[in-house]
Image (spheres, grey):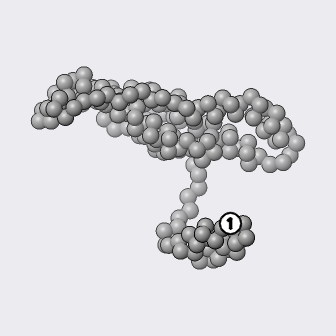
Amino acid sequence: MAGDPEQIQKQVLEKYAEKFPSSYLDVVRHADLSTLTWASLKFRQPWGIIFGKLSKGNVTVAGDAMHPMTPDLGQGGGSSLEDAVVLGRHIGNSVINNGGLIVPGDMAKAIDDYVKERRWRAAFLVTGSYLAGWVHLGGDKWWVKFLRDGIFYKYLFGRISGLVHKHCGKLPALSSGDMDHSSKKD
């Protein structure tokens, strides 16, 4: 479908008018076309996650900035939440270990520990998601069906889908009375 947004909207409505309930099509009819943008899905090579620089000092990346992935495992948002918990756990433990103070050198170590903990899991999720999408969209050729049905679903999919379950640990508990917000160690 090519053309201006109004033409695309018309084509969508015509193509899917009989396939979807009218309430779904109402969403398309009432969409603010000025907010539509096109962005291709990006694949980040897993070795870029494994060997790349994902933090510098007190700054790091998380979520899609660390591990953009295709939607084929449905783990993009979930893995971003995992990032938040793991990062929060490392930063929280650093603050607790320093008596409620934010210590720049220790904060950099906490962030580095977060990156070390998340690096491999993120690379596996990106790879697994890409493979799942590639297999699903591979086509109907005999060798693709063999790869998909005979190898992927039989041997690999169970392992890949097992990646979706992850316990990130507990966030540390720190009451606001335990923190001295007025000073920092260097």
Residue at figure coordinates x 24%, y 25% from the top left: 96
SS of the residue under disc 1: loop
In this picture, residue 45 sits left or right of residue 95: right
Residue found at the far right of this picture: 142
Q: Quadrant of residue 172?
A: top left
Q: Which residue is mark 1?
A: 20
Q: Nearer the viewer, residue 108 or 92?
A: 92
Going by the picture, which residue comes out furthest to the top?
97
**Residue 179 to residue 63: above or below:** above
Relative vertical location of residue 72 with respect to residue 160 in this rendering, above or below: below
> x, y percentage for residue 179?
17, 31
Location of residue 151 with respect to 65 vertically, above or below: above
Residue displayed at 51% across by 30% down: 166
Quarter of the image where one finds residue 173: top left
Quadrant occupied by the N terminus: bottom right
Q: Residue at x 43, y 36 (%)?
A: 83
